[in-house]
Image: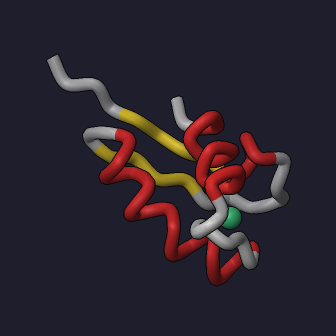
Amino acid sequence: MQEQKSFRCKDLGLECEFEEKAENENELMKRVEGHVQTAHQMNLEQPEVQEKIRKAMK
Ligand SMILES: [Zn+2]
């Protein structure tokens, strides 16, 4: 059984249509990080920022 994970910027309360899916959380994080860093100036080197994004993943 494959556990797909998805992320939407809207779940972070952002006015943004970006969404992404991946096979697992780590893969999804890789795909999402470029977007959130450039579009939303989030610093993923901060653990609390990573945590916030992981919690928004479904
Ligand atoms: Zn976004």
Q: Quadrant of ligand 1?
A: bottom right
Give the residue displayed 40% in from the left and 47% down from the top: 21
Viewer-proximal residue, 1 or 17? 1
Closer-to-camera residue (35/46):
46
Q: Is residue 11 above or below residue 42?
A: above
| Residue 46: image location, x then y, percent | 66, 63
Residue 18, percent from left and from top: 61, 60
In the visual, does 12 lie left or right of 51? right
Give the colour scheme shown. Answer: secondary structure
Q: Residue at x 40, y 63 (%)?
A: 31
Q: Residue furthest top?
A: 1
Name the one closer to the observer, 42 or 15: 42
Residue drawn 64% across and 37% down?
A: 56
If the image is split into quadrants, where does the N terminus sit? top left
Which residue is located at x 74 percent, y 78 percent?
41
x then y, percent, for residue 9: 69, 53
Looking at this view, name the residue that lies furthest to the bottom. 38
Q: Quadrant of residue 23?
A: top left
The percent coordinates of residue 7 (x first, y second) are: 54, 45
Depicted 39 relative to depicted 8: above or below: below
Q: Residue 48 versus residue 58: which sits nearer the camera? A: 48
Q: Along the horizontal axis of the image, is 18 left or right of 16? A: left
